Image (cartoon, rainbow, N blue to C red):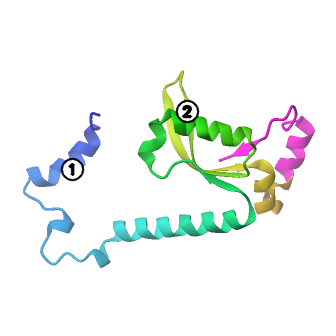
Amino acid sequence: MPQRPAARLAREFPTIHGFLRDDQLPGYNETFDLGRFLMRQGRAFEKAVLAELAQRWQLVRITHRPDEARALSAAIATHEAMEAAVPIIAGGVLRDPQLRMFGVVDLLVRSDVLGQLCPRHLSAIHSSSRRSGSRTGGTTAWST
């Protein structure tokens, strides 16, 4: 897969001009690497949120890595979980073959579950969606 120019430039620019990445400098201490710290904290937070949600509702995880967005099987699994009305889908793959677009969403939350999670903020949305019939014909509304 060809690499994007910006990614290639970010990777090659420092070394072309004689600079070293921070993690290659003498005395580098990972403890003070803000980027690594933020990623670690973000992953820990996501894990805690998913664990909390899984205690209250059925939760299905489709993917674990961003590169799985290209897997047709992951998109099919996401669609099947939505058809089965699984309350919360983590790492679901959404795709549009006509536009050749695909991606992994953090969470797909069924609208009634979202209403339970945030009742005050979503009461107006739910009352208007009930009036407009967005849940007719066995269809379930989803929020990302």
Q: Which residue is rendered at x = 44% and y = 50% of the image?
A: 65
Q: Taking 103 as reference, is 123 above or below it?
A: below
Q: Is residue 5 left or right of residue 74?
A: left
- Pick the front one: 78 or 99: 78
* Relative image position of residue 77 (x, y in whole percent): 60, 39
Whether residue 109 is visible, yes or no, is yes
Residue ID at (24%, 49%): 10
For the question of whether residue 118 can be seen, the reply is no
Position of residue 74 relative to residue 116, above or below, is above
In the rendered view, does 48 fall on the left or right side of 30? Answer: right
Q: Quadrant of residue 120?
A: bottom right
What residue span does the magenta drawing correspond to?
A: 124-144
| Mark 1 neighbour density, 10 Å: few (under 14) some (14–19) many (20 or more) | few
Residue 24 pos. (x, y %): 15, 66
- What residue occupies the far right of the structure in this picture? 131
Question: How packed is label 2: few (under 14 Cα within 10 Å), some, or many (20 or more)?
Answer: some
- Earlier in the chain: of badge 1 and badge 2, it is 1
Q: Quadrant of residue 29?
A: bottom left
Q: Secondary structure at mark 1?
A: helix
Looking at the rendered structure, the secondary structure element under dot 2 is strand
**Quarter of the figure with the N terminus:** top left
Residue 95: which disc? 2
Which numbered marker is on residue 51? Answer: none
Residue drawn at the location 77% of the way across and 49% of the way down: 111
The amino acid type found where label 2 is placed reads: Arg
Q: In percent of the image, x 50 and y 31: which residue is there?
A: 101
> What residue is shown with label 1?
11
User: Position of 130 compared to 59: left or right?
Assistant: right
The single residue placed furthest to the top in the displayed view is 98
The three-letter code of the residue at mark 1 reads: Arg
Any magenta on residue 59? Answer: no
